[in-house]
Image: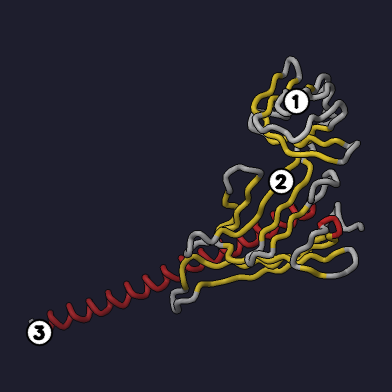
Amino acid sequence: MLELAIAILLAGVVISAVFSLYLTQHQQMLRQGEVSDMQANIRSAAGALVNFVQMAGFNVPKCVDPIETRDTNPDTIVITFDSSQLKDVVIKDDMLDLVSPIHCQGSDLGNISAGDWIYLYDPTNSIGEFCHVSSVNDPHNLLYHDTPVTREYLQGTQVMKLRRLKVYVDHSDSVQKNLMIQEMDSSPQVYAEGISNLNFRYILADGSVVSQTTFPRFIHMVEIDISAATAAPGFFNSSHRTRNLSLRTKVRNLGMP
């Protein structure tokens, strides 16, 4: 009986050691997977930011800020550029009042749908505004809108589809911070998980470096600092794994005084 008891005890010790080793390796594999995801997320976020910044100001009227800089720590950036979905769409008849439909006879409205935002730009007076489309009358080339405009736009006013993207870090979840993208008034969407910090520095045409500016068309280059962290702490300590990435990109359509 003594030998049996000793054998059972030794077997329990061995099984416990094997299980402990398996558990440690399993936890390490999970943590390594989280690190890999974090690295993929920070690369994805950086790539998207570079693409957006490079597009800023593309075919955007001078009355529209191509970049809105907000030094909010983490920073927020709002980028505007032309979607290139509309070509030579203009108003053909003067608007009668602030809520009257927009007449675009002879123009292709195939890329405009109910719920879209369009931009009305008067090139003569260099003024314009965003307008929300409520419905499209294709046979008569009419655009109906549910947001009254501030002025009666005249014949020759350009109709554009500008994209306006707000990029920021959402800190509402204390555990998982995410990079968010919001287009116009749509609901913000998670673009990359685990992004904990975001900062921008703007290099202007004269070489000065600022954290925000009221002269966005002078922005020549943008420096981006982005940080990511795992959702769970490391297995051997209570610290979260982190990664930082810094890069610089030229703004293709801006930077000229």
Instruction: Tell me if residue 34 can be seen.
Output: yes
Secondary structure found at label 1: loop
Q: CA distance from mark 3 to mark 2?
A: 79 Å
Q: Are the residues at dot 1 and dot 2 in contact (C-beta closer than 8 Å)?
A: no
Q: How is the image coloured?
A: secondary structure
Q: Which residue is mark 2?
A: 164
Mark 1: amino acid: Asp
Mark 1 against mark 2, which lies toward the viewer?
Answer: 1
User: Is disc 2 placed on a helix, strand or loop?
Assistant: strand
Around disc 2, counting alpha carbons within 10 Å, would you say few (fewer than 14), some (14 to 19), or many (20 or more)?
A: many
State left or right for residue 122 relative to residue 98.
Answer: right
Q: Nearer the viewer, residue 248 or 197?
A: 197
The N terminus - image quarter: bottom left
Residue 85 in view of the camera: no
Q: Which residue is mark 1?
A: 97
User: Does 2 appear above or below 207?
Assistant: below
Query: Could you classify mark 3 by the number of other residues whose Cα lies within 10 Å: few (under 14), some (14-19), or many (20 or more)?
Result: few
Q: Using the image as rendered, state which of residue 14 and residue 78 is in the foreground.
A: 78
Task: From the top left corner, tell me how far across and down residue 249 is, in percent.
Answer: 79, 61
Query: Tag 3's secondary structure?
Result: helix
Residue to which mark 3 is pinned: 2
Q: Nearer the viewer, mark 3 or mark 2?
A: 2
Image quadrant assignment for residue 209: bottom right
Closer mark to the observer between disc 3 and disc 1: 1
Name which residue lies at 79% across and 42% down.
82
Residue 127 percent across, percent down from the top left: 83, 40
